Image (spheres, helix red, strand yellow):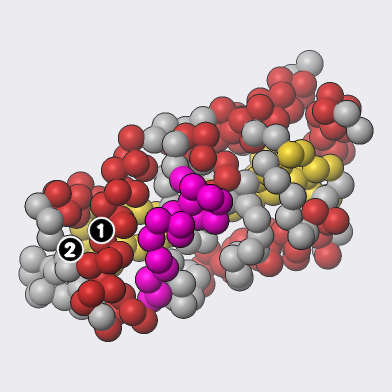
Amino acid sequence: MVYIEKIKESVELIKKSSYIVAFTGAGISTESGIPDFRSTEGIWKKFRIVSYQEFLSDKNARIEFWKMAKELVKTILNAKPNEAHKALAEFEKMGILKYVITQNIDNLHQLAGSKNVIELHGNYKKLICLNCGKRYSVNDVLQKLENNEFDLRCDECKGIIKPEVVFFGEPLPEIELTLANKIATKCDLMFVIGSSLQVEPAASIPRLAYYKGAKLIFINKSSTEWDFMAKITFYEKASKVLKNILDESKN
């Protein structure tokens, strides 16, 4: 199918579906200026991965992580939702989209207006002392980082401060993962947007939807090994595709 035919077919699938959800990864936010993880310009090309266990046990690893986080957090704070985030929020407002399940930590879905957002990997705005449970805001932490404090400790008990985002080697939040899996088994149409589907167990959610009979629409800038699952595949910018689908659905 040519592009416009894919847009029209996507709208037809929406009209025929009763429980539609979106699954989003880092690729939906690159147009907002937030780097992804695996591309040639991605985060892991500039910084190495610090695992959960390393963060807990190794001061040097924590320092390495926070130096990366200082750069990333400032980028996220300056980011604005793009047309893809806004289109998903509009679909929810119209009663078409039930949930956004996201791997992202950037809070852009909420800023765009989405209400039903399931964050599988947490949110960069939330931080906690692992010892006493005191909460910190991202601005509190950024101030420490600007002062070149890179082994962040709690003001109350000197415990380790950790962002409430999921590290490699750390389990996903049970409540969010359970709900996402439940939704995946229930949906009949899922948009998979900006995800290479390489990070488990989050990547298993679209597969679960597929094997339970849902139709999938993939929107990625490049192919993935799971494209065979898609009823329709777009290799385009998510902002362009979702805005075109939204506009066509209103005709």
Is 169 a magenta residue? no
Is 48 a magenta residue? yes
Residue placed at 9% from the left, 75% from the top? 157
Amino acid type, residue under disc 1 in the picture: Lys
The answer to whether residue 140 of the structure is visible from this angle is no
Labels 1 and 2: the sequence-earlier one:
1
Residue placed at 22% from the left, 61% from the top? 135
The answer to whether residue 206 of the structure is visible from this angle is yes
In the structure shown, which secondary structural element does the residue marked by tag 1 occupy? helix
Residue placed at 34% from the left, 49% from the top? 72
137 is higher (above) or lower (below) than 199: above
Location of residue 60 in the rendering, given as x and y in whole percent from the top left corner: 23, 74
15 is higher (above) or lower (below) than 195: above
Tell me the residue that label 2 is attached to: 150
Q: Quadrant of residue 162?
A: bottom left
Residue placed at 20% from the left, 50% from the top? 142
Q: What whole-number distance in Å separates the C-alpha atoms at marks 1 and 2?
A: 7 Å
Residue closest to the far top: 251
210 is higher (above) or lower (below) than 26: below
Location of residue 175 in the rendering, given as x and y in whole percent from the top left corner: 51, 68
- Check if mark 1's residue and mark 2's residue have beta carbons within 8 Å: yes
Tell me the residue that label 1 is attached to: 67
130 is higher (above) or lower (below) than 14: below
Location of residue 189 in the rendering, given as x and y in whole percent from the top left corner: 78, 47
Left or right? Give the position of 49 relative to 100: left
Left or right? Give the position of 199 relative to 105: right
Span of residues in magenta: 35-52
